[in-house]
Image (cartoon, rainbow, N blue to C red):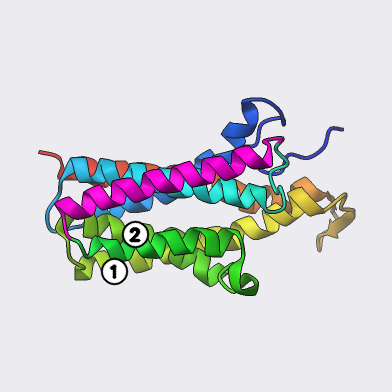
Amino acid sequence: MGEERPAFYALPAGGLRDYWTLLHPPYTAWHLSYVAIGAATASCFHLERVGLALLAFFLGVGVGAHALDERRGRPLRTHIPDGVLIALAAVSLAGALGIGLYGSSMVSWWGLTFIAAGLFMVPAYNLEWFGGSFHSNFWFAVMWGGFPALTGSFAQTGRIEVAGVLVAVACALVSSAQRELSTPVRWLRRNVEFVTGEVRTKDGAVELLDESTLRAAPEGALRVLWMAMVFLAAGLVAARLP
């Protein structure tokens, strides 16, 4: 049997396949959906601003954050050189910064506070600054769930609205649920060599346990939930179009 993949979406290591794996495509799409959901619930709606916010978060989270995370510990087991990962992080974060500055000039210079927060959160979480204080379930929910939704809403109006705050809380809670599901799955895929055991039911039936049995339910939920959030975001955006 071959080595277990580090994630259900990971391709065999090597070449361009590593860059696909690095992007964490399902989870990146999931977190980008929060940006669109926040935007769609704002009191006014500008499609071009949604596009800019999505691009900024794709660069900052989809590329930059994941490159830093892979640089620290190689959780995805890619063969991407350290120098390339650092360059990807630097260029993508610079691109996100540029988009953020442009967007702030159009909407509100208060957007600089969101830019500063984002530029701090990416390395603080992924490089585990301050002894890993920000690398926790709580901060994952805030940074990758609540923050994108609130930013998406703010980018539409230039102000913080009640609806945007409520949606940000909801997205943070969904991200918390994602973390609760993904943590044991990652542990099983990346750290466990084998599992052996059995479940005996009251009627005497016996079911053998292995690693795939233990992760089937949480991983199955993750496979469905990322698609559900993307379709929800697309539906909300479509509802705001003329």
Quadrant containing the N terminus is top right
Which mark is in front, 2 or 1? 2
Indicate the position of residue 123 as horizontal and vertical percent values.
53, 59
- Which residue is at the front of the view, 65 or 147? 65
Indicate the position of residue 168 as horizontal and vertical percent values.
33, 65
Quadrant containing the C terminus is top left
| Residue 89 highlighted magenta (yes or no) | yes
Query: Vertical placement of 108 versus 93: above or below?
Result: below
Indicate the position of residue 201 as horizontal and vertical percent values.
81, 60
| Residue 156 highlighted magenta (yes or no) | no
- Residue bearing mark 1: 166
Indicate the position of residue 10 as horizontal and vertical percent values.
65, 36
Residue visible at 70% across and 38% down in the picture? 78
Query: Vertical placement of 136 versus 40: above or below?
Result: below
Local SS, label 2:
helix
Q: Which residues are magenta?
A: 79-108
Picture quadrant where residue 85 is located: top right
Mark 2 is surrounded, within 10 Å at the Cα level, by few (under 14), some (14 to 19) or many (20 or more) other residues, namely many
| Residue at far left of view | 242
Residue 171 seen in render: no
Local SS, label 1:
helix
Task: Identify which amino acid the numbered label 1 is placed on.
Answer: Leu
15 to the left or right of 46: right
Residue 115, label in figure: 2
- Which residue is at the front of the view, 176 or 121? 121
Mark 1 is surrounded, within 10 Å at the Cα level, by few (under 14), some (14 to 19) or many (20 or more) other residues, namely some
99 to the left or right of 3: left
87 to the left or right of 150: right
Residue visible at 82% across and 37% down in the picture? 3
Residue visible at 46% across and 64% down in the picture? 120
